[in-house]
Image (spheres, rainbow, N blue to C red):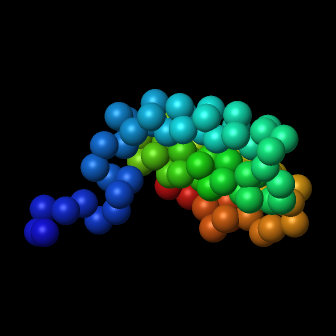
Amino acid sequence: MDNAPDSDYEDDGAGAVPAMREAVARRYIVSQLPQLEGPYRHNSLAVALRDLGRHQRAADDALADHAFRESASIRKSIGLPALEEYFNIGAT
């Protein structure tokens, strides 16, 4: 595919942000369910927040750093290191 974007986050940056916000909202609900155990439910939310941050960064949304920080905070709370984007906050 010669016309394929370099990354999944370049094709529709601004349009993807609302969809990712909805995904994060739903992952937050799931992370609160008492039926689920272990760190997986929280990590899933952290990954969704990281993905939201990626889409926000592609759309030049100033809230991208907030999503990365929240993702890192969640992962720290469950004993996991921050995802790679946390270390690149502010580097666009």
Using residue 2 as the reference point, say whether residue 46 is left or right of it. right
Using residue 36 as the reference point, say whether residue 66 is left or right of it. left
Q: Is 32 placed above or below 47 here? A: above
Using residue 83 as the reference point, say whether residue 55 is left or right of it. left
Q: Residue furthest front?
A: 35
Q: In terms of depth relative to the viewer, which is nearer, 32 or 57?
A: 32
Q: Is residue 36 in sight in this rendering?
A: yes
Q: Residue at x 61, y 35 (%)?
A: 26
Q: Residue at x 37, y 43 (%)?
A: 13
Counting from the top left corner in percent of width and height, residue 67 is at 65, 44
Q: In terms of depth relative to the viewer, which is nearer, 47 or 2?
A: 47
Q: Is 31 placed above or below 92 here? A: above
Q: Residue at x 87, y 66 (%)?
A: 79
Using residue 40 as the reference point, say whether residue 55 is left or right of it. left
Could you tell me how many numbered marks the image carries? 0
On the image, which quarter does residue 40 sit in?
bottom right
Counting from the top left corner in percent of width and height, residue 18 is at 46, 30
Q: Is residue 67 in sight in this rendering?
A: no
Counting from the top left corner in percent of width and height, residue 74 is at 80, 52
